[in-house]
Amino acid sequence: MRYVMRRTRRLAAVLAAALATAVMLGPDPVVAHPAHPAAARQTRPNVLLVVLDDARPEGMAALPQTMAWLADGTAYPNTVAATPSCGPSRATLLSGRYAHNHGVLHQADVDQLDHSQTLQHTLHEAGYGTAAVGKFTNNWALEQTPPGFDHSALVGGGYTNARFMVDGKQRRVPYSTTFIGQQVNNYLDGFEADDAKPWFLYAGFTAPHAPWMPEPQYADRQFDWEPGPAVGEADRSDKPAYVRRHRAGRAAADAIRLGQLRTLLSVDDALTRVRRHLERLGELDDTLVVLVSDNAKFWGEHGLDEKFMPYAAAYRVPLFLSWPGHLPASSDERLASTVDLTPTVLAAAGLTADYVLDGHDLRGDVRREATLLEYWQDSHNGGFPTWASRVAPGERQFTRYVDLAGRLLSQEYYDLAADPGELVNLLGDADPGNDPDVSADAATLAAWQKCAGTTCP
């Protein structure tokens, strides 16, 4: 399961634009001077965090302009979503903690997150101007700016005629993806009124989440595809019963894939406009850009059409970091996790969280051999069972399913070296002769499910 993906200074700020945006941002605007003295420059990087919704690494084919932008940075092709479910995953992205520590186990558990233990809170306390644009997390009250953010322009989802709450005021927009990019640029103008103060901008796109509604110019765009062997898997008798109940075929897979890619084309346009605006503001070199997805989504693998499950098509996510002059233009093949995003950003900013982080700074020397995936049964998602998994890419993956009382339901073991498509569950293929000894994996997994900080993988 190896998956490798191939890959100016300050200009005068426009006074009129800064003034207009500052008025929009707050009651006491500060007008940017068109030429800031060098002594007033910030010492920490700006941070632009772009979060896609349900995007797979393969979906980056629909972001050619963005990939060209981020090519001077580092790609992490072996990145997994610690919990492949929107709410828990976004809490992990923004806290650097596993779900069993931050408490958002289900989509409706957003109130369980301690907002004093987040990336945005830490950056804000350190003097960053902060704003959240787009989709924040499921079940969030859109009129409420999330703690740690100075401003917000939030949407619950959708593409056309989307309802945004912009700093508490409702606004309908023709196409959500385009508006998210525009609003990011508006907030950028406001932040640049004080050039000595760094900013953190969270940009959460609805795309490529369903229902896929591409812009008219992209509605018929085609992308070539060679499906892997797990698409149309003939024999699923070794899979758990809940998997066998799903029957997504090639037609369903094509509809999901094309819908996702066509909506991502507009994300590429929106991010290109953001890049050009950063360039006009002279902020490209001072900005750490992170692009990631909360989780991925099946394109028919194993007959599946959702996420929430311990297969690579659901937990493999794109991750790119770009900070000119500070990160190499490379593909870093270490095993990375969404739990690493907050530790990496804070370390890049020279900051230390005042709470325990479970992840690692991806610019450092830590190299995992394996990592933890976890998921809790959630009626919001359709009732998929609770599971935990130990995955060592290219080697093996062991998964345990339990019921609501914690009793064992079933297990899966895949020899990923010989079977990267996860076609043969060696614990479910009716051949006891090839059953591996999973006692060590089971013990490790049980310990990881209770880990915190340095005891986490």
Image: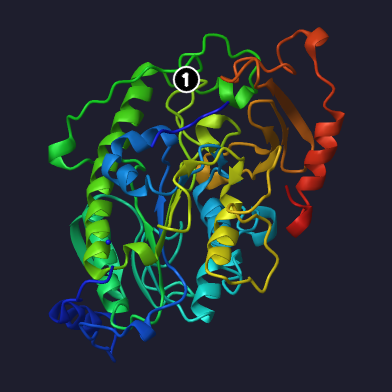
Q: Quadrant of the N terminus?
A: top right
Left or right, 63 with reference to 414: left
Q: Residue at x 33, y 34 (%)?
A: 61
The one of 427 and 204 positioned closer to us in this rendering: 204
Left or right, 244 with reference to 70: right
The x and y percentages for residue 108 are 53, 57
The type of colouring in the image is rainbow
The x and y percentages for residue 243 are 57, 24
Left or right, 114 with reference to 275: right
The x and y percentages for residue 44 are 47, 73
| Badge 1: residue crowd in 10 Å (few <14, some 14–19, many ≥20) | some
Left or right, 3 with reference to 365: left
Q: Residue at x 36, y 23 (%)?
A: 252
451 in relation to 65, above or below: below
Task: Report the residue that reaches farthest toward the bottom.
Answer: 28
Look at the image and tell me whether residue 328 can be seen: yes
Under tag 1, what secondary structure? loop
Give the quarter of the image for residue 195: bottom left
Kind of residue indicated by mark 1: Arg
Look at the image and tell me whether residue 109 can be seen: no
State how many labels appear: 1
Give the quarter of the image for residue 385: top right
Q: Residue at x 68, y 57 (%)?
A: 358
Q: Residue at x 28, y 78 (%)?
A: 190
236 in relation to 41, above or below: above
The x and y percentages for residue 154 are 34, 64
153 in relation to 440, above or below: below
Reading the image, the residue beneath label 1 is 247
